[in-house]
Amino acid sequence: MFSAAKRYWHIEIIGSLDKPFSWKRLFQKCRRYSRYRYVFWFRVAYVLNEQGNKFWRRRGKLLNEKLSREYNVEIMLGATIGEGLWIAHPNGIVITSHAQIGKNFKIWQNSTIGIKGLCNDVKLLIGDGVRVHAHACIISDDLQLGDGAIIGAGTFLDKSVAAGHVAFNRRTTDVREYDTTSMGRLQQ
């Protein structure tokens, strides 16, 4: 059980399997950076939840609930997340338990990967090396993001994206002269 968590920590916190594992280095990075601290404890909960034993699954669920309250990150334990999870800022991230995420997944703050809940057969498949930037919202019951797909900041996505493609919403900003007759009076 502990060796599985150690492999995740080696890849996600130390940096890669090529670097030598050091408990001192692991704890220094976890103490210094909240994103590594979150990933450390999330992987403990994740590994406990994968155990067949009802006792350990319950402990993993309780730990994940505590992490959700403390870090404002709600990654459900039913989600399958490959090695190399990278969280830029552990704040406002939500990932449904129906998601199957590949290796080297990167996600930024205030992003959501969820389901509509309109059908019983839900498939959210996310490939290797996918990046989901800040304030992105991915909501669908049947969606596939290919390997290396990039979801731009502030994007709402409800359809599949092929491997190596970028998805983003176009936005325009209008700057106009202030007119009290059409826009109302400013508050003092």
Image (cartoon, helix red, strand yellow):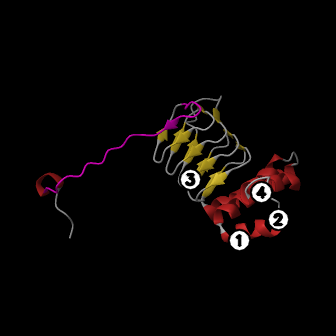
Give the main secondary structure, helix, strand or loop, of the magenta stretch. Answer: loop
Q: Residue 57: image x %, image y %?
A: 81, 51
Which mark sits nearer the N-terminus, 4 or 2? Answer: 4
Query: Image check: 163 left or right of 83?
Result: left
Residue 47, above or below 165:
below
Label 4 secondary element: helix
Which mark sits nearer the N-terminus, 1 or 2? Answer: 2
Q: Residue at x 82, y 65 (%)?
A: 22
Query: Image check: 33 left or right of 132?
Result: right
Distance between the alpha carbons at the discs numbered 4 and 3:
19 Å
- Numbered range of the magenta stretch: 160-179
For disc 4, the neighbor class at 10 Å (few under 14, some 14 to 19, many from 20) is many
Residue 184, visible in the rendered structure: yes
Residue bearing mark 3: 108
- Write down the quadrant of residue 23 in the picture: bottom right
Q: Tell me, yes or no, whether the highlighted magenta stretch contains residue 162.
A: yes
For the residues labelled 4 and 1, say whether their Cβ atoms are less than 8 Å apart. no
* Mark nearer the viewer, 4 or 2: 2
